[in-house]
Amino acid sequence: MASARKTSSGEMVLKGIGVSPGIAVAPVFLLAADDRLVPERRLTDREALAEIMRLENAIIETRRQLTDIHRHVEEQAGRQHADIFDMHKLVLDDPAFIAEVFDGILKRHANAEHAIRLAAEGYTDTLSRVEDDYLRERVSDVKDVARRLIRNLSDSTHTPLTGLSVRSVIVGVDLAPSETATLQREWVLGFATDQGSPTSHTAIMARALGIPAVVGLSNISQLVKVGEEILVDGSSGEVVLRPSTERRRMAGLYAEEQRTIQTELGTLRDQPAETADGHAIVLSANVELVSELPAVLQSGAQGIGLFRSEYLYISRETLPSEEEQLAAYGEAAKAMAPQPVIIRTVDLGGDKFASSVRVPHEVNPFLGFRAIRFCLAQPALFKTQVRAILRASALGRVSMMYPMISNVGEVRQANAIVDACKEELRGEGLDFDEKMPVGAMVEIPSAALTAEIIAPHVKFFSLGTNDLVQYTLAVDRVNERVAHLYEPTHPAVLRLIRCTIEAGHAHGVWVGVCGEMAGNPVLTPLLVGMGLDELSTVPANVPAVKDAIRRVRLSDAQALAENAAKLGTAAEILDLCRELTKRTAPEILRLAGKPGAERGSATPGK
Ligand code: PEP
Ligand code: MG
């Protein structure tokens, strides 16, 4: 849980969850919560008339955008998805709503942005109190239209982070995927957020971009002032407001030591990922964006074990076309060839949403309409992606895997769609790899427990431990209040991993891990000892994981896994892993910084 204390030198030290290693010191850039972004001004009578003109222009632009998006979505994904934009047009053309906004400007002398916000709040307040589900659902339509109108007034389609031009630490409640996907790396030195956990998308993106980050700080966004100095230590989870000269000096020394270790690990780049006694592991990289390909090549990874394709779908108004997707997957396939690239079919829902796809509000989005469930219900959208992936398979060594598989029926259904896409491509004379391997992610306990039934239908399993841990332990992966219960080394999680490995191997199906657990070098011997064939992690973690593989003997790793299987708690198992690491690869613990803050770990607070 987050905590805060003051020091005698006037610093404020906050403790959250370190999710991306490294130290950053820079001025605060405060990312205001959405509703605080609206500028508020009192107008004179003359200004009020001019404001009406501004508003009318914004309404015209908004209507034009909605018509364009409607057409595009209808072409790409069918009528059903486009309907939402009809709904938005109805809100925009609702005379009562617009009259309310006009009144705000003319009678209350509010600027247009503020008047829209007031009118939208009045509407959504009333709508959320009605009994009718259909009307209650309109709340999000009103909010979306208000947001679009306000954006069109400010004449900017950019997220607040696109305007950044000073090297800063970003502080906010949380970052939206659209914000992380569009930020300019050179200006962002660190993140510190109120919400989040090691496996929330902000944390995953921070690691992918190599940006030190601390999340789960409760109320940091209310404690900081714009422009004041802040230190973020992504290894220990500490954030210091107004750091003293001494603390900054120590941070500099620490950063220097980290760089030295990283440079040493960098020399492993062309060495094989095999244990001290020659047992080879496939060590691959996870990516979200095509812009990460150079980092993958630089890391010494043997290909891409997880391409999170959903980042092609978010931070945009329309769905990506087959050609656009082919360009992205093809670029990855060509850059990595002859190494493999595993593209995961889109995993929207949970904590990742796309503005072009309508997903009704859900009380439990992680247990809801997400990933493969969503794709199987939207065959047109799914087929566009499958066709693009198949076509990319002609350009390199491409595999594909399905997220959130909970039963064999879903695999069969998805495979049938793949077969139909192959048939279409053959008919159209378009190239693809007839033998493109298709795998299933194992991230739901039911899939792990029935891995034996699923195995005959796939070529590989990839354990998505970020979700597997949350679903096994009933711990929301993005809720900082229960982050201390999120334990990847919990015996139940390890049993499910073992069950998957045994079932896979019995059917000649290789088994990897692409969750954050694979990026924690302290856990590498345990995973290797359990018999995993592949580990896939963010490029920044590849050198340390390779070091951990190369330092251990397979027999010692196997003994560790056997001993771990006899222990009762996650903490005991983690201690056992730490002891072995202390003996075989002490530099990894130094890399973790302070004791107990394992680098890239998904075990906060340990
Ligand atoms: C996982 O769940 O471990 C995984 C790799 O997928 P994501 O983090 O994108 O849900
Ligand atoms: Mg997952």
Image (tube, helix red, strand yellow):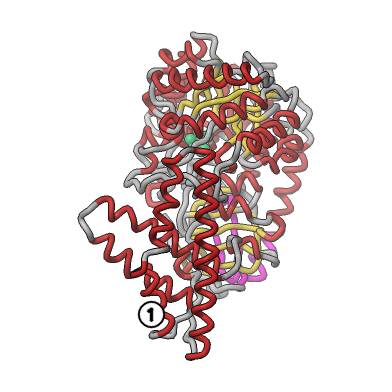
| Residue located at (54% from left, 18% from top) | 460
Magenta stretch: residue 393 in it? no
Percent of width and height locating residue 316? 57, 50
Q: Amino acid at mark 1?
A: Asp
Q: Position of residue 190 (x, y in %)?
A: 62, 57
Numbered circles on residues, count: 1
User: At which x and y percent is residue 551?
Assistant: 67, 27
Is residue 335 shown left or right of residue 563? right
User: Which residue in the structure is indicated by mark 1?
Assistant: 103
The location of residue 236, given as percent across then percent down, is 56, 52
* Range of magenta residues: 228-251
From this viewpoint, is residue 32 visible?
Answer: no
For label 1, the SS is helix
Q: Nearer the viewer, residue 554 or 198?
A: 198
* Mark 1 Cβ inside 8 Å of ligand 1: no
Identify the residue at the far left of this view: 131
Question: Which is more toward the observer, 168 or 582?
Answer: 168
Where 487 falls versus 110 (above or below)? above
Residue in the picture at 47% in, 22% down: 414
